[in-house]
Amino acid sequence: MKTPLSPAEVHKQYEKYLSTFLKTVPDATLRLRLSHEADNFFRSCALGVWNADGGLLTTGYVEYYNAVYLRGNQTPSILFWELATSVTEYSGLMAPDFFHRMRAYDKVAGTDLSRRFVDIVTHMGLLFAAVDGVVSPGEAEFVNASSELLTRLCDKDGLKGSRTPLDARDFVTVRPAAGTGGPQAPAPSPAGPEKEEKPEKKEPEPTLEELLAQMDELCGLEKVKADVKSLINLVKVRKLREKEGLPVPPLSLHLVFMGNPGTGKTTVARLLAKLYHVIGVLSKGQLVEVDRSGLVAGFVGQTALKTQEVINKALGGVLFLDEAYALTSHTGQNDFGQEAVEVLLKNMEDHRDDLIVIVAGYTDLMGDFIHSNPGLESRFNKYFYFDDYNGEQMLQIFRSMCKKNGYALDDAAEGYAKEFLSEMYACRDENFGNARDVRNFFERSVAFQSDRVAGLEQVDKDTLMALTAADLKQAAGEEDEPEEVPQDAE
């Protein structure tokens, strides 16, 4: 029997396969849908694999299931009885919606994304089968059937690329003959013959100057940029005073980010985590992003455990708590948000030398949150205010999205984008999403452009890149006025 994989190894392999694949997807809308929807699809694959093995699970399988998520997506937290029920009631694998969109894109662009995705499905199916150290015949048959289902759809569309060379039956664990008492032959790795692993080369960490340059490149946020630089200077001088044996007054580096959605709060928090690491405040410099649902459970005692688990991941870095006011805005009898706050405060004290907490949300609501608990008031005394982006800044963000994703605007399209985004800013209300609204506008524009291009008989590179004013008008919900036909026209 092969040594069983750990949940961390399963997550690492899953993240590696999907992240590498996502980088090769040219279409921004497709890439976004895949990154958001892939986790549910692959968790469904895991259920199918384990159902094919007889559905006999141990509590350890919960950790494997919860390990299937991409960075930036919400981490699942299924309970054992929920997992066991889902495996038992598994109804069969279906091609996900994003796979249909992927095939349509391949058909127009002449790419082979769908074929390569089938390879990933096969690899991951074998990975799920091997979590107990054994790949059974039933598991192998399910993996092959899943691969064949998706391959037939590719064949039906006449897509380029070859069928996956992997046959899951080649990885079935060979059991010893009865009475031999010999050891089982190990199942071969889905990635091929095992080789001696070479240590991965770590990319050089960015310097303080490079990180500050990245901060300067952010659109708008002039006051925030100045506040960040002032804070970094304050910390640097404190370090120098400590080195010279001079006294340093107490300083809390925990922060409150106040502003509307889409104003760059998460981006700034991520840069701050790296900046704190570079100047020696934090040992690792990672950012762990979470909201109320990632901390609060539905039963007494579970919230403390759930919150502590998240904090453990953030040690050495920054814990970014979005919409923090949701922890204290619920006043029901069975609400456990206050329990999460107490655990958070305790850890901020216990790990004050290697944990930074940033809480974020709407300006008015964040004030209520901070004043809801004396412990919060004493630990959060630095406030960064994120102003809304104006029309010109939103246009700058839109241009940047186009450039980054390989799209081009002609003069008419740019003129319409400027007009539309300026009006969006002028008419903004409490639901204004800033850069999120710009991103949604961009993705809708790309979707309408794809529909237009897909209907063309001949497509070249310039056509694939061009976003027209008509595409943008459709994305804005505005149709072109039909041309009037002269009355004397035949």
Image (cartoon, grey):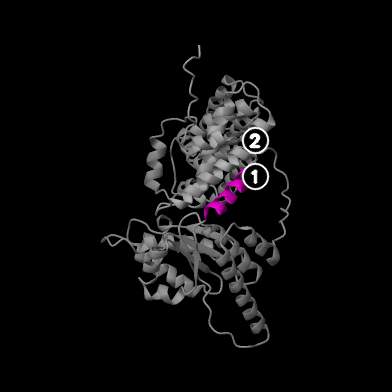
Residue where numbered disc 1 is placed: 403
Choose the circle earlier in sequence order: 2 or 1.
1
List x then y, in percent, for residue 19.
61, 45
Is 365 or 86 nearer to us in this picture? 365
Q: Quadrant of the N terminus?
A: top right
Nearest the viewer among 294 and 130 is: 294
Q: Is residue 132 above or below residue 431?
A: above
State the SS at label 1: helix
Q: Position of residue 88 (x, y in %)?
A: 39, 36
Q: Answer above or below: position of 246 versus 439.
A: below
Q: Residues within 10 Å of mark 2 (few under 14, many from 20)?
A: some
Where does the magenta region start and end? 390-403
Main secondary-structure element of the magenta-colored stretch: helix
- Which residue is the site of mark 2? 465
Which amino acid type corresponds to the residue marked 2 in the rendered image? Met
The mark found on residue 315 in the picture is none
Rendered view: 21 above or below 368: above
Residue type at mark 1 is Lys
C-alpha separation, residue under disc 2 versus residue under disc 1: 10 Å
